[in-house]
Image (tube, coloured by chain):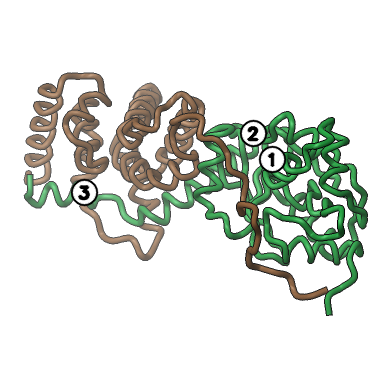
Amino acid sequence: MGSPPTTTTSRFPPHPRFIHVSNGPPPFQRFLDAHREDVWRFLVASVGREDAEDCFQETFISALRAYPRLRASSNLKAWVLTIAHRKALDAHRARARGALPVAEIADVADGADRSSSAAPPRDESLWHAVHELPDRQRSVVVLRFLGDLPHRDIAAAIGCSEEAARRSLHEGLTTLRQEVIA
Amino acid sequence: MNDSLAHALRTMPGETPKQAAAAARRLTERIVAERLADIDYAPVESPFGTLHAASTRRGLVRLAFPEEPLDEFLERLARKLSPRIVAAPAALDPVQRELDEYFSGRRRTFDLALDWALITPFARRVLSNTAAIPYGGHLSYAEVAAEAGSPRGARAAGNALGSNPIPIVIPCHRVLHSGGGLGGYGGGLDRKQYLLELEGALPPRL
């Protein structure tokens, strides 16, 4: 027996030729690989490092359930950030019910990052200020700067008009500027 | 917005890539454990190089030779079966184990459950006859066609064998020309020869 052949010399095609039957989304693993960092950044900024893990899992598991119904032409990033946005709101509401002060959560999130020696120093007052924004302002600010979504997609994600999204972004940034400078 | 606040907002959380990759790994472990995906895939090592293997809840559905790019392999599965596909190395461990045993000569039949979802009805008749050819044995294209109810369909049988989505495990390499020639093989004739020599169906080449 010779050495195992590793090349192809065949009159047959090298692999089965399957018929192209539908125009669905890419394989889920590819979708996860492409968007995991956007979703992670968005969630850490929205709910803090501690709750980001659960929200991340819930986001992608919801996405997996709905996945076969998507079309290839869907804006997958805006779609998954819309789901993440809903999970983040759920986490904020659950936290409000638990009456845990936001400042404490921000400390936990920050502590988790500080445990890693490579973590860069970060502006804690800004971090706190983002968490303390009203729901819609926080969502818009985070979708814009950490999700990098255009106003149109932000409006679709949180279910308001593009104009309202712009306004909320402006209000949120104004508040943050005051808080951080103050 | 191009001031320092915008910059600070964009760069707020640290170590995103590493943490996101770790979170994604934990997620896929959960998806596999709770069987939330329709297809699991993983690389499988063989003497031919790294194969790609995919399984559904029913069993092994696809085994691809190394020259098939991973993206094409995944795209085909997504289009033909379901886009709910995740990387799940542990889920394919039994495939790796049985292939290791086969290639080292310690296994003569595969016990793996198979999913025939990618096989058309005619190919199914041809390939199930092929699956019944014992280790070390062989049939001709005409014999396999006749058993599939298509006595003059040697060429059609050849096409069905060429479309085998689970080569090696469904032993299409055991079908030869009636004159004794090797015929064709989806993974290349060298590999067909290698498998037949491994099984003792052909004398080793010098």
* Farthest residue, direction top: A160
In this figure, which residue is indicated by the disc labeled 1?
B61
Q: Are marks 1 and 2 in contact (CB under 8 Å)?
A: no
In the image, the chain rendered in brown is A
Q: Residues within 10 Å of mark 1 (few under 14, many from 20)?
A: many
| Secondary-structure class at tag 2 | loop
Amino acid at circle 3: Arg
Where is the N terminus of chain B found, in terms of image quarters? top left
Labels 3 and 1 in the same subunit: yes
Of badges 3 and 1, the one in the foreground is 1
Q: Which residue is mark 3?
A: B10
Q: Amino acid at mark 1?
A: Val
Pinpoint residue B186: horizontal percent, then vertical percent: 68, 53
Name the residue furthest bottom.
B206
Query: Image quadrant of residue A87?
Result: top left
For disc 2, the marked residue is B35
User: At 35% across and 23% down in the image, what residue appears?
Assistant: A93
The residue mark sitting in front, 2 or 3, is 2
